[in-house]
Image: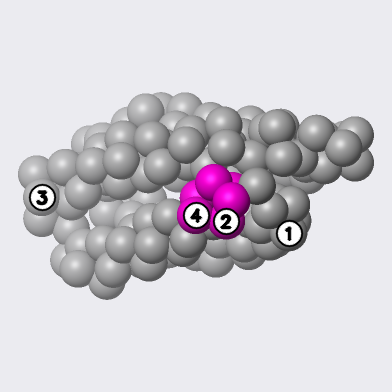
Amino acid sequence: MALIIWNDTLSVKVAELDGQHRKLIAMINDLTDAIPKGKGKAVMGQTVQGLIDYAKIHFRTEEKYFAQLGYPQAARHIQEHEAFTQKVTGFEAGSAQGQMGPSIQLLQFLGDWLIQHILKTDKEYVDFFSAKGLK
């Protein structure tokens, strides 16, 4: 069963960024489905690498728009990106050692991060980006 289901409340009204958020949600849901089936360890490495790839692509995309459009909250937002990347890298180390615990911890972290970052921090740029014509 999916932990997170995409809906309009998650949308930041920029198609490219919404697509990247959907990818993150799919990775979280893959891990959620794998854990009760005893496949958490097998999916963990894949999920963590996907998250690292996601962070590189998605954060660069947002930061490119921040720079192009002069987003005034860019520095604070970028700090959250850096904190996320450090945390996920820590989970990667646990996964490389074959630990199951990090799968559950990663899942909890991602759920919290989505609520706090996408629904709060990312939502702060919606009106700004819209006013600049970004869709």
Dot 4 corresponds to which residue?
93
SS of the residue under disc 1? helix
Viewer-proximal residue among 27 and 96:
96
Q: Residue at x 26, y 62 (%)?
A: 78
Mainly helix, strand or loop, the magenta region?
A: helix
Disc 1 to disc 2: CB gap under 8 Å:
yes
Residue 17 pos. (x, y %):
39, 36
Which span is picked out in magenta? 92-97
Residue 10 pos. (x, y %):
58, 45
Crowdedness near tag 3: few (<14), some (14–19) or many (≥20) residues, C-alpha within 10 Å: few
Spatial CA distance of label 3 from label 1 is 38 Å
Spatial CA distance of label 2 from label 4 is 4 Å
Magenta-colored stretch includes residue 74: no
Dot 3 corresponds to which residue?
67
Disc 2 to disc 4: CB gap under 8 Å:
yes
Quadrant in the picture for the C terminus: top left
Viewer-proximal residue among 15 and 63:
63
Residue 105 pos. (x, y %):
68, 61
SS of the residue under disc 4? helix
Residue 81 pos. (x, y %):
34, 59
Q: Amino acid at mark 1?
A: Gly
Dot 2 corresponds to which residue?
94
Spatial CA distance of label 4 from label 3 is 32 Å
Spatial CA distance of label 1 from label 4 is 12 Å
Viewer-proximal residue among 34 and 125:
34
Q: Residue at x 19, y 68 (%)?
A: 75
Q: Amino acid at mark 3?
A: Ala
Dot 1 corresponds to which residue?
101
Disc 4 to disc 3: CB gap under 8 Å:
no
Does label 3 or label 1 sit earlier along the sequence? 3
Crowdedness near tag 4: few (<14), some (14–19) or many (≥20) residues, C-alpha within 10 Å: some
Is 69 positioned to the left or the right of 6 in the image? left
